[in-house]
Image (cartoon, rainbow, N blue to C red):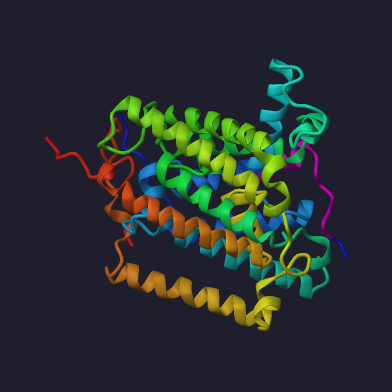
Amino acid sequence: MSQPRALWNPYVAGVALGTVLFLTFIATGHGLGVTGATTSITAVTTAAIAPGAISPHDYLAGYVRRGLDQWIVWEVLGVAIGGMAGAMLGRRFAKRIDGPPQASTPARLGLAISGGLVSGLGARFALGCTSGMGLSGSAPLGAAGFLFLIGFFVAGAAAGFILKPLWRRRSVT
Amino acid sequence: MIAPLDFVGPISGILLGVGFGFVLENAGFGNPEILTGQLRFTNWAVFQTMFTAIVVSSILLNIAAYFGVISFSNIFIPSVLFWGTLLGGMFVGIGFAVGGYCPGTSVVALMSGRLDAILFIVGIGVGTLVFNAIYPMIGSWIYTQTGPDALTVPQLLHMPVWAVIALLAAVLIAVGYFVSRGKLTAGCQVSASVGVPSGVAVHHKQ
């Protein structure tokens, strides 16, 4: 099996990311995002599986009405394609269950779904995630973007400190 | 004013999304060890990449505005909904530490073969439904706006735009300097994660 290619230098990646973000503002008038799409998909899927589960006055009702033909849903489809292209071209694609080295497979899956839940809840509080609020809100120097990032890094570092033992590397045999 | 071009259809979304996902993957942001390493301060790639992107896009937007290509009044700048924005950031940060990803990076992780990311994405959906359920109780206070619409940091601090960008760039350069001097641990110390051929997660040398 061939060796994976090296990742980009973070500053190079940052310049590329900043350029894509700038082009997004030029093309659409807003930045990049992700949870706008996951919210639409959740709303539409829930309404399809369990009609009546989302009532007309619910938070998600508007998302059900607007449907999936949204710029951000197409954009997230693009993120998936671009991510896969990066992994393939970089020879980094490998099927695995990733997570902390000290966590068993069921524990990793439990952490993944709990982390996702907290993240999905938080993104609705903030009306955006790390991309849509942290990055795209901060690029035009919006105070909300920076407030989001301060909360993100402070709470993330506190939780990261508590979970640090899980990330100790297994001794190499 | 030329921009925004109102280029908001599927082609625009897919093209820009491909660029976004491709860059995230090549930055190593499908890898939870690199991502959460930032929270343990063992890997600074997340901070360096994000802050470079913010500074670069901010400079480009201001150049475009200077030449009349775009006006800041025509681009979306989020308003500060203090508790929602702050608590939301904190929850997304905790989710990042616990689950290994944020929403965007979980998509890239899944597409690079990480099956745990499927559960993270399902979790996002569950969290969205939890929010829908509790929204009637919290909506009014989390979405109360603080300050004027689209408040910016230069307005808040009464500083010129160039000074704020210079300040951000200075922080970025300082972090880069300390990382290169080994005072902060650099990304190159990340080694292979479980189940991956060795060297998969090896980061660039600083």
**Image position of B182 (left or right of A32):** left
Q: Residue at x 48, y 51 (%)?
A: B93
Residue stretch in magenta: B3-16
Percent x, y for residue A29?
A: 78, 55
Looking at the rendering, which quadrant does residue B38 occupy? bottom left
Name the one closer to the observer, A150 or A20: A150
Quadrant of the snapshot with the N terminus of chain B: bottom right
Q: Is residue A25 left or right of residue B126?
A: right
Residue placed most toward the observer, A156 or B182: A156
In the rendered image, the quadrant that contains the C terminus of chain B is bottom left
Taking A79 as reference, is A32 above or below it? Answer: below
Q: Is residue A168 left or right of residue A15?
A: left
Counting from the top left corner in percent of width and height, residue B149 is at: 78, 65
- Indicate the position of residue A139 as horizontal and vertical percent values: 64, 63
**Residue B11 belongs to magenta span:** yes
Q: Is residue A158 visible?
A: yes
Residue B119 against residue A122 in the figure, above or below: above
Is A158 one of the magenta-colored residues? no
Which residue is situated farthest in the front direction here?
B137
Q: How many marks?
A: 0
User: Is B18 located above or below residue B153 in the figure?
Assistant: above
Residue at the far left: name it: A173
Q: Does any portion of residue A135 appear in the rendered image?
A: no
